[in-house]
Amino acid sequence: MDALEEKRINNIVTLCGVLAGRPLFSHVSRDETYYLFPLEVERLSGTFDTINIMARETLLNQLVLEPRAKISILGELRSFNNKTGTGSRLVITVFAQEIALSEEEDLNLVALRGVLCKPPNLRRTPMGREICDLLIATARRYGRSDYLPCISWGQNAAQSAAWPVGATIELSGRIQSRTYIKQENGISTVRTAFEVSMIQQQLVVDE
């Protein structure tokens, strides 16, 4: 199995949505320039998730992106530990490997294979529905990993709450964005959290 096949089994994201803002300079790494932009993807309910996309300048230069252009993206979910003290501590983006103009319907699909790296947290919503918070580590090349927050619901939540730390998990779902109020030093700020809302899940038994 080559590196690309392995990466796509561990962590693959397929999106189709609307460009919700122009690409802005993010950083330079290994002589590559990277840009960040928001992608707006509609849910079946009619609400929207706004997902941050990271892309190389060379990839963006292959397209002419008009405002509100419809585009498809193939990539992987990435995490970054923000140590600046400003904004969320865990920054989640989609690293784009392919971008193309599209006329297809909105799409938001994630498939992950990784290791459960902290005890699951089973809780109930104010409406009484069970929900379980999970943190999954997916392997990347060069010994690096991405730490990705995931949530399961209902019967899946009860099942995943019993999983042990260190277990290998396979799951599929969608990227979900939600806003919340953060209280710090008496000051309230609105922040956005990103997580994978799990639709299918499986505990991988060692062969």
Image (cartoon, rainbow, N blue to C red):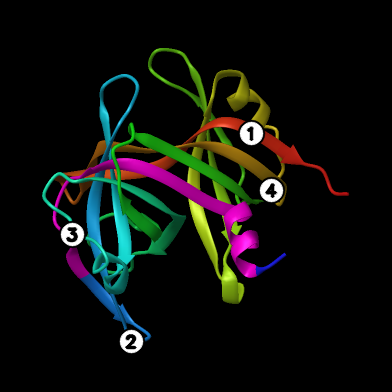
Q: Determine whether, in the image, residue 18 is placed left or right of residue 157.
A: left
Is label 2 in contact with label 1 (beta carbons under 8 Å)?
Answer: no
**What is the distance, in whole Å, between disc 2 and disc 3 at their CAs?**
23 Å
User: What's the amino acid at mark 2?
Assistant: Asp
Q: Secondary structure at mark 1?
A: strand
* Residue range corresponding to the magenta coloring: 3-25
Q: Relative to 141, does residue 180 appear above or below in the rendering?
A: above
User: What's the amino acid at mark 3?
Assistant: Val
**What is the distance, in whole Å, between disc 4 and disc 3 at their CAs?**
46 Å
Who comes first in sequence, dot 1 or dot 4? 4
Q: Determine whether, in the image, residue 146 is placed left or right of residue 91.
A: right
Residue 64, numbered circle: 3
Residue 16 inside the magenta-drawn segment: yes
Q: Pick whichever, 30 or 197, lies toward us.
A: 30
Residue drawn at x 73%, y 38% is: 203
Pointer 1 residue: 201
Q: Determine whether, in the image, residue 55 is placed left or right of residue 181.
A: right
